[in-house]
């Protein structure tokens, strides 16, 4: 049985389907595209999966069902686990999972020099792109924006953190002090683990936003889906100032 889950989401030109094999009792996910941009995205995803698998003992299984000049179709085996859903306190209520993802980031990306450019995931989000096996072990999926050695160390990690903070503010209309304290300590943990480039130390949110907007090519039309770009100027200045005070 095959069912359509997503039809070209966020201008991606990709069809995303679910297939269930009743004989083997297994679920698969299928991505396909016949547009140049969609084919490029899926091709990038394959490179990202291969890179990620080389760091994580092949946790994502896939096969290429079809690959031609004007069409590509891949089949991804299901990683059975849980995905975090949006709650009324997205940051505060998910600190346990945030810590696990940051540990995982340091494990996967930590082999690179802190001052060098590192591979980009581009949409490292707790709300959809990370599966937790046995509610413990993170597996990062959806590598459609992957690029080798293209971003400063820590980019995906702090984008991940500030996205959850954005949802926290959006849901509560308030900057939660406890969440901000945790984010501050996590930035320090990334720094002491040599997983945060110096450019993100003083004004992490402002620098993050500027990097995304100055590197539009990595996301194209899909840049609009990144919540961290939705912080307004006043919010950016306030959050960066509060984080700076905590570090002092």
Image (cartoon, helix red, strand yellow):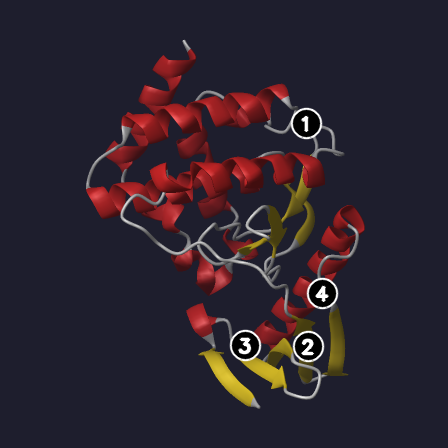
Q: CA distance from mark 2 to mark 3?
A: 13 Å
Residue located at (27% from left, 31% from top): 176
Among numbered discs 2 and 3, the one appearing first in the sequence: 3
Instruction: Using the image, determine if residue 57 lies above or below residue 44.
Output: above
Crowd around label 4: few <14 · some 14–19 · many ≥20 (10 Å): many
Among numbered discs 4 and 3, the one appearing first in the sequence: 3
Crowd around label 1: few <14 · some 14–19 · many ≥20 (10 Å): some
Name the mark on residue 99: none
**Pointer 2: what residue?**
75
Q: Give the structural element (helix, strand or loop) at label 1.
A: loop
Q: Name the outermost residue toward the top.
A: 248
Q: CA distance from mark 4 to mark 1?
A: 26 Å
Among numbered discs 1 and 3, the one appearing first in the sequence: 3
**Where's residue 241, x and y in %?**
32, 21
**Pointer 4: what residue?**
46
Determine if residue 124 is in view: yes
Callout in the foreground (2, 4): 2
**Where's residue 157, x and y in %?**
54, 38
Callout in the foreground (1, 2): 2
Residue located at (74% from left, 66% from top): 61
Q: CA distance from mark 4 to mark 3?
A: 14 Å
**Where's residue 146, x and y in %?**
64, 55
**Pointer 1: what residue?**
115
Name the mark on residue 14: 3
Q: CA distance from mark 2 to mark 4?
A: 11 Å
Residue located at (50% from left, 42% from top): 97
Q: Give the structural element (helix, strand or loop) at label 2.
A: strand
């Amino acid at each position: 049985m095959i069912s359509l889950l997503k039809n070209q989401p966020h201008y991606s030109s990709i069809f995303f389907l679910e297939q269930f094999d009743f004989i083997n009792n297994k679920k698969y996910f299928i991505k396909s595209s016949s547009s140049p941009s969609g084919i490029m995205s899926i091709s990038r995803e394959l490179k990202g999966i291969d890179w990620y698998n080389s760091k994580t003992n092949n946790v994502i299984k896939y096969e290429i069902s079809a690959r031609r000049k004007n069409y590509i179709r891949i089949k991804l085996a299901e990683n059975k686990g849980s995905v975090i859903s949006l709650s009324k306190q997205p940051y505060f209520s998910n600190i346990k999972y945030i810590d696990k993802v940051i540990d995982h980031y340091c494990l996967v990306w930590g082999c690179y020099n802190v001052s060098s450019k590192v591979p980009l995931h581009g949409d490292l989000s707790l709300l959809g792109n990370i599966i937790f096996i046995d509610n413990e072990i993170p597996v990062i999926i959806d590598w459609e924006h992957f690029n080798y050695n293209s971003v400063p160390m820590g980019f995906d990690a702090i984008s991940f953190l500030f996205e959850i903070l954005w949802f926290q503010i959006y849901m509560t209309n308030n900057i939660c002090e406890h969440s901000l304290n945790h984010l501050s300590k996590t930035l320090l943990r990334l720094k002491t683990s040599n997983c945060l480039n110096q450019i993100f130390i003083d004004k992490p949110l402002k620098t993050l936003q500027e990097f995304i907007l100055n590197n539009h090519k990595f996301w194209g039309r899909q840049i609009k889906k990144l919540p961290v770009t939705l912080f307004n100027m006043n919010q950016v200045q306030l959050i960066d100032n509060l984080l700076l005070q905590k570090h002092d």
